[in-house]
Amino acid sequence: MTIKTTKVFEKNLKAYVDGKRYIINQGGARSSKTYSIVQLLILIAMYQKKETYVSIVSATLPHLKRGAMRDFFTVLQSLNMYDENSYNRTDKIYRINKTQIEFFSVDTAEKVYGSSRDLLFINEANNIDEERARQLVIRTKGTVFFDFNPTCEFYVHTDYMTRKNSTYIHSTFADNPYLDENIKQELHEAGERNQNFKRVFVDGEIGVSQDLIFTNWEIGEFVENENVAVIYGQDYGYVSSPTTLIKIGVDRKNHVIYAHECYYLKGLGVDRIAQLNEESAGKGLIVADSAEVRLIDELRKRGNNIKPAIKGKVATELLLLQDYKLIVTPVSANIIKELQMYRWLDTNNSVPVDNFNHAIDALRYGYTYISGNAEKKVWVA
């Protein structure tokens, strides 16, 4: 039996043989990542000596049929292995020797709460939300394969890729020697017309999401001089969400905002918040979430220089922040993560998703206070 493979297949095979739990395939269009993973799963199935269960999943059934399922059956036919009697079309299960390979979508939450499996392939993982992916992973005994075009950073980058038993495989169409020349040319030309398309689908690098709220930021040092008004913003959380304190510097002359993460912690009581505020801000003014007036009063009693924010329309305040260059200190990991993940919920850019905003809300409060009181010379040392 002769199998035409690419370097992407070889890298996935090595990672599997090495016993990696998470094999992460990030790449551009037509790099052979999906095809290579399907080839490997078929090869694994051929040599299993005990009952083995494999799940190949995608966000929706149409997407699954156009992608991983089509590749799966193409590989079988190329190897002269396809057997109609081995395929249960109703349940979308194909059997190879002792291995049962099932295909399903996760477009409804209940589909992920099924039985366990030995191997899992999450196709185009960036189209599946983190919780559904987690439910699939925790029901998988062995290797989990992910593949995706990196339209933006998401949980695979921030979680699974950071684990010790993971491996990262990057690929582009240049890794696929069997790709038609017309398709190569089309990718080149499309990339020349659109830089974000080139970054994601040609180079296989993380792109800028079209619904991302903030793209006007960079990492740098917090500058303090006579042009920079310094203030602190605070947002409150409970057991499951963090309380944040962000140091903010607004340079209205040069249209720059500096942001530094003082703390970003869950499960804090009043005394601990007051202590951390004193340690981080001293007597600097803290502008805090006005929904927590009682908490602000308690913090003021404990010596914090703190007052409630005057809130306006969230979308308007976010648009005002977009007019500045945001410079975030290198150690502000949670601010950076939120800037990478905070998105508009609608196509009109009028409603943000109420998530990944605990530091950004604190930033809004501080900036809005300074902006609204600029004529009163509210410059806090």
Image (tube, grey):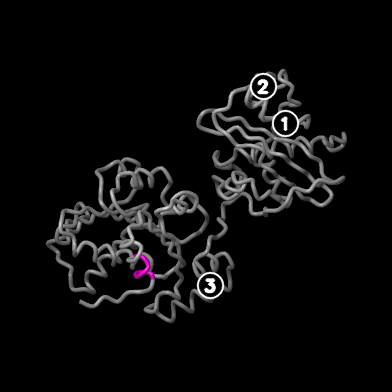
Disc 3 packing (10 Å; few <14; some 14–19; many ≥20): some
Residue 173 occupies quadrant: bottom left
Task: In this rendered view, identify the residue nearer to me: 367 or 297.
Answer: 297
Looking at the rendered image, the quarter that the N terminus falls into is bottom left
Task: In this rendered view, identify the residue nearer to me: 243 or 109.
Answer: 243
Q: Which residue is mark 3?
A: 190
**Which residues fall within the magenta stretch?**
8-12
Disc 2 packing (10 Å; few <14; some 14–19; many ≥20): some
Where does the image place residue 249, in percent across and percent down from the top left?
77, 43
**Mark number, residue 293:** 2
- At x 67%, y 25%, the residue is 274
The answer to whether residue 200 is magenta is: no
Nearest to N terminus: mark 2 or mark 1: 1
Where does the image place residue 63, in percent across and percent down from the top left?
36, 58
Nearest to N terminus: mark 1 or mark 3: 3
Where does the image place residue 51, in percent across and percent down from the top left?
16, 53
> In this rendering, would 330 be left or right of 168?
right
Instruction: Point out the frontmost of discs 1 and 3.
Output: 1
Mark 3: amino acid: Ala
Element on which disc 3 rests: helix
Element on which disc 1 rests: strand
> Label 2 to label 1, Cα distance in Å?
11 Å
Q: Which residue is mark 1?
A: 287
- At x 44%, y 51%, the residue is 163
Mark 2: amino acid: Val
Looking at the rendered image, the quarter that the C terminus falls into is top right
